[in-house]
Amino acid sequence: MIKQALDRAFQLAMHSVIRHRMNFLAHLHLAGSDPERIVGNLMADFVRGSDLEHFAPAIERGIREHRAIDAFTDAHPRFLESKRLISPARRRCSGIIVDLAFDHCLCRTWDQFCDVPLEEFVEGGYQVLEAHRDELPGKMVRMLPRMIRENWLVSYREVDGLARALDRLSQRSPRLGMLHGSAEEVRENVDALEEQFLAFYPELIAFVQQRR
């Protein structure tokens, strides 16, 4: 009982520390072609609360879609199985690691899901965000130049790029220190993670399409 209470307290604390999960590429890919829906999907983790009426309707739909995607992902058996691949020492941060690992797997298998080359697709996403900078939350505005300069979404294609993202997250709070070096777990389990991802992602695509 005490252990469960402590684990729950940790998860609540983690939720307050990590308000965005960094798996931007999947959300960009799933957002479709409407610019405002793209903006909503990519800014959603920077937006708190359920009162979204002050956003443009398409942005609001994008935010709600992002949240539905996250809920679907968190409960999916393939995602849960992937989390079990992470070592016990990092198990409490396994969801963050697998989120980013799945973006890595999406990069690796990009041609199976999109006819537009990855670099071209991501550049289009950056342009949409730049064009709607005035509608983005302040924290995202401050993050955007670095995201574009370092080309985060394409950098996930290599484990070294994934490592930089995870190590950045590890510096945000002592609670996240266990993320430092965690990309090695992705490297060691990449084939198993990719197998889980390829079984999961088509179901996620179908889920998003059914909601529209």
Image (tube, rainbow, N blue to C red):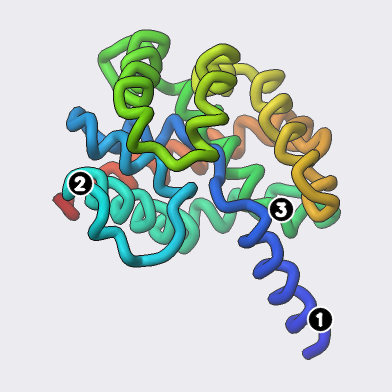
Indicate the amino acid at tag 1.
Lys
Q: Along the polypeptide, which appears first: circle 1 or circle 2?
A: 1
Indicate the amino acid at tag 3.
Cys
Can the viewer see residue 18 in this picture?
yes
Name the residue: 85% across, 51% down.
174
The numbered disc on residue 58 is none
Q: Secondary structure at mark 2?
A: loop
In this view, the residue farthest toward the bottom is 1
Q: Which residue lies under the disc numbered 1?
A: 3
Q: Is 9 on the left-hand or right-hand side of 180?
A: left
The numbered disc on residue 56 is 2
Crowd tier of the residue under label 2, counting other residues whose Cα lies within 10 Å: few below 14, some 14–19, many 20 or above: some
Q: Secondary structure at mark 1?
A: helix
Nearer to me, 81 or 127:
127
Query: Which label lies toward us, 1 or 2?
Result: 2
Q: Along the polypeptide, which appears first: circle 3 or circle 1?
A: 1
The numbered disc on residue 93 is 3
Indicate the amino acid at tag 2.
Ala
